[in-house]
Image: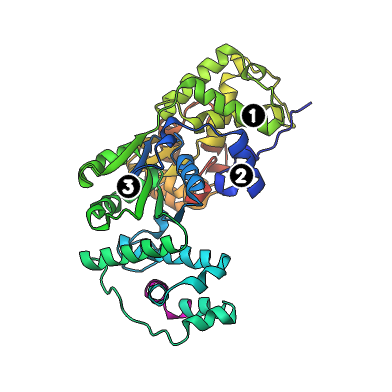
Amino acid sequence: MPLTYEDWPFRHMRARSAEETWRWWEGCYISPDASLILGGGPHWLVVAGGTGSGKSVAIADLEGREAQTSLIVRYPAERWPGAKQAWVPDGNHLAQIMAGAGLALRNYLVAQPSIIGGLSNVQRGFLRWLLTKYGGPRAYLRWVDGLEPSLAETFQGLAYEELYPSTTNPLDMQGQIDELASMARKLGFHRVLVTVDMDQHEAQAHLGQVESLFDLHDTMDHPGLVVAAALPAEAIQNARLIERARGRVTVVYLKWYAAQTREISIKHIRQALGNPSAEWGDFVSNNLLYELGEALVSEYGDNAPAGWVGLAESILHLASREVDPLPLPLQRWHLLDTKRALFARHMLLRLDPAGHGIWRGPKFIKLTGQPLRFLKILKERYPEPVNAEDKGLIAIAGNKDNIHTIASRTRALIEPFTDHPVYLHNRRGDGGYWLEALNINDK
């Protein structure tokens, strides 16, 4: 009989319900030693590590612990200068951060309207300036119009004044940050905490903007404002962040031992099965577990919690299939099946937007020429197959006969098991070629 399990422990943190999130922190989380110092000190903070090392979780942990004492401003990459969804078109980092802070203040005051009555005229003036400057006059009017009449009256007759016209002049920058910090203190917070969470792909695409953010450390230096960023270790080195901030950045490198990552993953299994006594030996033999651990280190470059959690879910999946479920505990002869499930479910294929190759889960594979162009066409047509008569494929190959040669070359470059493909598939005859295990957010 197939195994049954709940998948919520394995979902992305933003995809869990409030109850599931609480259960995850209670039942699945192990705090890295790094989290003990994340909340201390006036310096900007950087959590560094490889893909799957738990940087995002460490930032979420910090946000949870600081929620009562800090005004939290999330600053995702899609809001950065130059991005299509930037809060302020053509605005620099300070403009985007102030816009995000305005939204955070507005949302907090909507949830806690009684605080508005205690604001001074100076603070009301700053609030009007902040919401109008970075959100537009209409956004400010909508917010006031949504307040209780008695509170809305406190803003009547309050004239707009351009308090700080520049986001590059040091005095204007300091003035904005000082008033924002003062407003946060008025609301009962100790500081404003700006959080940044960038994965390997985002950091690679926005390296110049990472550099410019940390170049602002001197002019944005204020005890009431801290930036906490999760960044790949490679980005820290490439952007020379410590030098740019003149050492006034606390960098915490996440490092996990094998025993810790095994414990994290078995905690996920226990929650998924509702079985607090489950152990790894119930699911895989010691020999298989060792080989799978070696494979994870080979792909991630280190002991990565995300890799082990993905492995745990893959094993539960193999045992839960309605057709041909694998018997537990899995043995060494199940190595290929387990690896293929791991790659297909948790190491998705993603084309590098800069056109230098592809990401296979945490691993970057450099590609150029025909293989890369071949994959781009398959990605554009995903999930439909592309047959050998396709004009785009023929244009790449020169003629129809060469398409199969290019496909074989591409498969040899990207597949972990050439004879048992995970990503690049084809059907003889007119079935064509297609991709599976593609990161659909990258379509």
Does 384 sit left or right of 171 as displayed? right
Residues shaded magenta: 127-139
Q: Which mark is residue 42?
A: 3
For mark 2, give the secondary structure.
helix
Q: Quadrant of the N terminus?
A: top right
The image position of residue 345, as x and y in percent, is 57, 36
Does 317 sit left or right of 340 as displayed? right
Does 416 sit left or right of 4 as displayed? left
Q: Earlier in the sequence, mark 1 or mark 3?
A: 3
For label 1, count other residues whose C-alpha is less than 10 Å away and answer few (under 14), some (14-19) or many (20+): many
The kind of residue tagged 2 is Thr
The image position of residue 99, as x and y in percent, is 40, 66
Q: Which mark is residue 10?
A: none
Q: Earlier in the sequence, mark 2 or mark 1?
A: 2
The kind of residue tagged 3 is Pro
Rendered view: 326 above or below 322: above
